């Protein structure tokens, strides 16, 4: 049967050719695939030798060799399927044990089959001169051969399981490459069954050449897979979710394709019955700035309609072939007002300012701007990787969307900052909203790393303050607060300075914390802005930072200072001012440090300022710090009673202290139950 020889020879040659082609790719998957193709080549060659066998020994030897090659083919197919489907079996514990067991069973099966040539333990042969098959020496199987078949079927089952599981787990548009391989495998299996059950009265087992002739299909599915249907579907999905209106005109100048955004902008494009020409479309859209349709150009389009944004960046392209002949035109429109950050899906910086300008143009005040940032994300990235850090940033964005009013304008700025603009909202309400967001964020933190949200607020009450100014003020307030936040990397500078200060002076951590808390209470009673409250908290901690530059012999002297020593002591305000100005983070409080020893009557230092010439925050710290020193023990004096301290404040009001601040401060103390 000459056609039998031709089929097996072609199959062997085909398998060998694709084996070499696979090896040339020099990848692990290519090596596994090439080995499988070589095994398919060997199966065809040994089967061909079996068909040509003319003696009993030759029939016995070639049949055993054929079954051994089949074992190797099935084993290599299992390896291939693990790599092709990227199965997790390859990474599981006990992998080596499974691999060694499979190799051992193949070795045992091969040894038994080769031994059968000499001892006929599992197969015997009988010559059938009138057999309709090309093979004249037919084998008679015993129990041992059925064990061989069971092992082969076990490998086949593993192959089908891996392929079927992968086929069902991937999205539908990507299934074709696996379905094609699965169908080819099933077809080969059916051919084998039909041959063994004699349903097909053909001269040879058609499954054998099918192993080799299927190699091109397997190769393409593995390395050169590209499904026109899948690619067309993918391209369509990309265009639909591009977030940019797009329209394509064919070489005749008619609409060839559009995406969802363009159809929403121009509903006339939904009419499938009428062909719309490019000229008609350009007239409908009033694209007046499009100079010519004969050349590519970019321009800004002001949308005259009600749908979509107000302004678009338009890119009009003339599509040409390799001979520079026009084959169509493409118009892509980028919304200048609705750019989104890819990670958080919040507005981009440009879109944020554009949207906020529209709000301010309506003249509705107050407009509250909040800038927030998640502390500790850098550490999360280092410990858990960027994926976890990005997940936490997305969580912040989700919380902003969930808890802020629906008309809030939300954006992601630079350095991980996020901004929110709230219309007709006062600072106190914004604080409550963001404190709730901070709490929700902390509850969802599963990293074990100390990370939370810090924020700063600025309020626009009229047209004298721009959005840029408000964002700058809110950002400065947030970064000042970060100095006080232990979960922020920026707090390390404050920790170092505070520790140095407490080691240099009588100041204690308790005094610093009490001063900070009481200053914040007084600041809130005075309705200070969020930015000033942040500066006040920092000032309460570092107003005496210049003392670290004063000699300990003067700073800790138990008795009265000489005039010269007193002049050195007074210089701590100027030294503190210079220390603060040397740091970007502390510079905003430098002026307040310089003047925190000025007196209301002008008798203080270093500038001799009087009354409201003294910065408000400096006056606040003077009152709060002095009161805390009065009511707590110090090495150089005993604590006063609350009543005596109150009387001392009243006595010095109008001379040392701002009388209005003293009045408000005493009211705060009464509300707190201190006096």
Image (cartoon, rainbow, N blue to C red):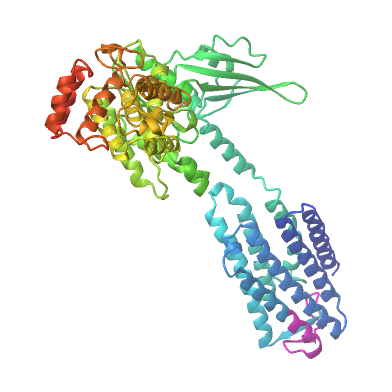
Residue 44 x/y as whole percent: 79, 68
Q: Is residue 658 magenta?
A: no
Residue 301 x/y as whole percent: 52, 14
Is 442 or 206 nearer to us in this picture? 442
For residue 474, say whether it is visible.
Answer: no
Identify the residue at horizontal 61%, vertical 55% (top origin): 178
- Magenta segment range? 110-135
For residue 440, say whether it is visible.
Answer: yes
Task: From this view, report whether residue 387 is shown above or below residue 128.
Answer: above
Residue 518 x/y as whole percent: 24, 31
Q: In which quarter of the image is the C terminus?
A: top left
Q: In which quarter of the image is the N terminus?
A: bottom right
Identify the residue at horizontal 78%, vertical 82% (top origin): 114
Task: From this view, report whether residue 61 is shown above or below residue 47.
Answer: below
Residue closest to the far right: 54
Task: Name which quarter of the figure residue 668 lies in.
Answer: top left
Task: Name which quarter of the figure residue 559 lies in.
Answer: top left
Residue 158 x/y as whole percent: 60, 68
């Amino acid at each position: 049967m000459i056609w039998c020889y031709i089929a097996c020879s072609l199959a062997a040659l085909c398998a060998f050719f694709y084996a070499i082609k696979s090896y040339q790719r020099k990848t692990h998957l290519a090596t596994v695939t090439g080995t499988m193709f070589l095994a398919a080549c060997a199966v065809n060659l040994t089967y061909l030798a079996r068909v040509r066998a003319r003696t009993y020994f030759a029939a016995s030897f070639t049949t055993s060799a054929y079954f051994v090659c089949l074992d190797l083919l099935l084993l290599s197919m299992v390896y291939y399927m693990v790599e092709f489907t990227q199965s997790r079996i390859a990474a599981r514990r006990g992998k080596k044990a499974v691999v060694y067991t499979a190799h051992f069973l193949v070795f045992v099966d091969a040894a038994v089959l080769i031994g059968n040539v000499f001892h006929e333990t599992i197969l015997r042969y009988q010559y059938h001169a009138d057999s309709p098959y090309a093979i004249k020496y037919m084998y008679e199987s015993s129990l041992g051969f059925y064990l061989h078949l069971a092992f082969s079927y076990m490998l086949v089952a593993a192959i089908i399981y891996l392929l079927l599981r992968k086929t069902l787990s991937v999205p539908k548009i990507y299934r074709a490459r696996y379905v094609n391989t699965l169908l080819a495998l099933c077809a080969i299996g059916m051919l084998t069954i039909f041959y063994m059950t004699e349903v097909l009265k053909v001269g040879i087992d058609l499954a054998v050449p099918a192993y080799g002739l299927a190699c091109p299909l397997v190769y393409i599915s593995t390395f050169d897979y590209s499904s026109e249907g899948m690619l067309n579907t993918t391209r369509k999905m990309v265009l639909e979710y591009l977030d940019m209106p797009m329209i394509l005109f064919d070489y005749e100048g008619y609409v060839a394709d559009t995406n969802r955004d363009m159809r929403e902008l121009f509903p006339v494009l939904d009419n499938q019955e009428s062909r719309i020409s490019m000229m008609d479309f350009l007239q409908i859209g009033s694209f007046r700035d499009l100079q010519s349709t004969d050349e590519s150009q970019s321009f800004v389009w002001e949308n005259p309609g009600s749908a979509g944004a107000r302004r678009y960046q338009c890119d009009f392209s003339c599509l040409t072939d390799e001979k520079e002949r026009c084959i169509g035109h493409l118009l892509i429109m980028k919304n200048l007002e609705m750019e989104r950050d890819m990670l958080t899906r919040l507005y981009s910086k440009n879109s944020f300012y554009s949207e906020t300008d529209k709000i301010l143009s309506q003249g509705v005040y107050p407009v509250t701007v909040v800038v927030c940032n998640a502390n500790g994300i850098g550490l999360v990235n280092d410990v858990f990787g960027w994926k976890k850090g990005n997940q936490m940033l997305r969580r912040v964005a989700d919380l902003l969307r969930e808890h802020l009013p629906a008309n809030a304008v939300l954006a992601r700025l630079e350095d991980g900052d996020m901004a929110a603009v709230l219309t007709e909202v006062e600072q106190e309400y914004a604080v409550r909203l963001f404190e709730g967001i901070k709490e929700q964020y902390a509850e969802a933190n599963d990293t074990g790393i100390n990370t939370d949200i810090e924020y700063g607020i600025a309020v626009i009450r009229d047209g004298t303050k721009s959005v840029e100014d408000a964002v700058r003020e809110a950002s400065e307030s947030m970064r000042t607060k970060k100095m006080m936040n232990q979960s922020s990397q920026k707090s390390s500078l404050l920790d170092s300075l505070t520790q140095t200060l407490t080691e240099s002076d009588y100041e204690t951590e308790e005094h610093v914390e009490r001063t900070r808390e009481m200053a914040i209470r007084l600041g809130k009673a005075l309705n200070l802005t969020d930015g000033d409250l942040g500066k006040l908290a920092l000032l309460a901690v570092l107003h005496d930072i210049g003392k670290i530059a004063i000699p300990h012999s003067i700073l800790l002297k138990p008795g009265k200072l000489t005039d010269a020593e007193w002049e050195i002591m007074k210089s701590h305000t100027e030294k503190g001012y210079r220390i603060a100005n040397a740091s970007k983070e502390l510079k905003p409080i430098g002026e307040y440090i310089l003047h925190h020893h000025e007196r209301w009557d002008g008798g203080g230092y270093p500038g001799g300022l009087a009354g409201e010439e003294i910065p408000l925050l400096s006056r606040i710290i003077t009152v709060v710090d002095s009161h805390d020193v009065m009511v707590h023990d110090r090495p150089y004096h005993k604590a006063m009673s609350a009543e005596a301290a109150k009387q001392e404040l009243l006595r010095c009001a109008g001379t040392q202290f701002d009388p209005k601040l003293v009045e408000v401060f005493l009211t705060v103390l009464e509300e707190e139950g201190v006096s």
